Amino acid sequence: GAGVSQSPSNKVTEKGKDVELRCDPISGHTALYWYRQRLGQGLEFLIYFQGNSAPDKSGLPSDRFSAERTGESVSTLTIQRTQQEDSAVYLCASSLVASGGQDTQYFGPGTRLTVL
Amino acid sequence: QQQVKQSPQSLIVQKGGISIINCAYENTAFDYFPWYQQFPGKGPALLIAIRPDVSEKKEGRFTISFNKSAKQFSLHIMDSQPGDSATYFCAATIGAGYALNFGKGTSLLVTP
C-alpha cells in the first residue's frame, strides 16, 4: 500500500507569511507525528495525534505553530508569521500503535521549507 | 536538551569494513531503541530496533548491541557497502505511542 505522503515537497516563502504543510498518513494508522529536521541536526518532535485523544503539543516551539488532524486521516501543520529560523525539513510519521508491539513510525519524504 | 547523544558525527569506512555508531541515553524509562537510515531527499526508514530485555539483535549485516547498565547502544554494520552510505539516526522512546527522541545523526560514507 501507499506510504506516508506529504505536500508540498518544497515550499519557499517570505518572512512573515503563513504556510500550511499537509500530511497523509498510512491508511489505518491511528497515530500521527510531526517532526522538524534542521540542517545537520536530528529530528525534533513537534506534535503527536492519537485517535480522538487531545494532541500532545509539548514539542511546538512557539504559538506560531499549530496543527490539526481530521479523524484518523489528513493532518495540516500551520506556521504563522514565518521566521528564517523556521527553515527546515518538516517530516510527518504515522504508526499503528499496536498494544504491546513495536510502534514503528513510518516517515514521509518531508516538506523542505525555506523562509527568505 | 538532547536526550540521546550520538557519535561520531561522520564516519568514513572502506568497502568491506565495519561501521560502528554509538549512542547514549539518560532516561531509564526508555524501552524501545530504533535505528533509522536516511538517504538524501528521503524520510528516515526504520533499519533495526531493540528492546532492553536483550543485549544484541542481528538482522543481516546490521547488529545492535545494547548495554543497559551503561545506558548505551550501538549499531554495527558488517561488510559495509557503498550502498550503505547514508545518515543514520539512533532514537529512544517509552513504548508505543510516544514521540521518538533522536540523536543528531551520523553521516556514513563507504568508499569503494
Image (cartoon, coloured by chain):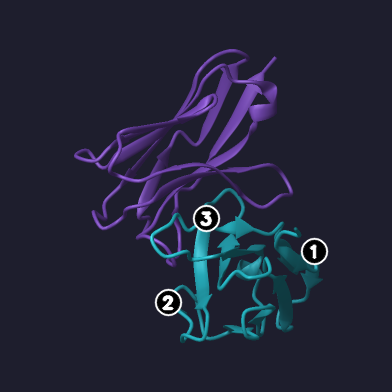
Judging by the rendered image, the residue that carries numbered circle 2 is: A58
| Classed neighbour count for the residue bearing mark 1: other residues with Cα under 10 Å, few (<14), some (14–19), many (≥20) | few
Looking at the rendered structure, the kind of residue marked 2 is Ser
**Gap in angstroms between the C-alphas marked 1 and 2:** 26 Å
Q: CA distance from mark 3 to mark 1?
A: 26 Å
Residue A54 locus on image (x, y percent): 46, 87
Instruction: Give the position of the C terminus of chain A as an image quadrant.
Output: bottom right
In-image side of B52 versus B75 (left or right): left
Number of numbered tags placed on the structure image: 3
Closer to the chain start, of discs 3 and 1, is 1
Q: Residue at x 50, y 18 (%)?
A: B18
On what subunit does the disc labeled 2 rest?
Answer: A
Q: Secondary structure at mark 2?
A: loop
The label number, if any, that marks residue A10 in the structure image: 1
Q: Are marks 1 and 2 on the same chain?
A: yes
The residue where tag 3 is placed is: A104
Task: In the picture, one chain is purple; tell me its letter.
Answer: B
Residue drawn at the location 42% of the way across and 63% of the way down: B96
- Residue B81, quarter of the rendered image: top right
Task: Indicate whether A49 appears above or below B103.
Answer: below
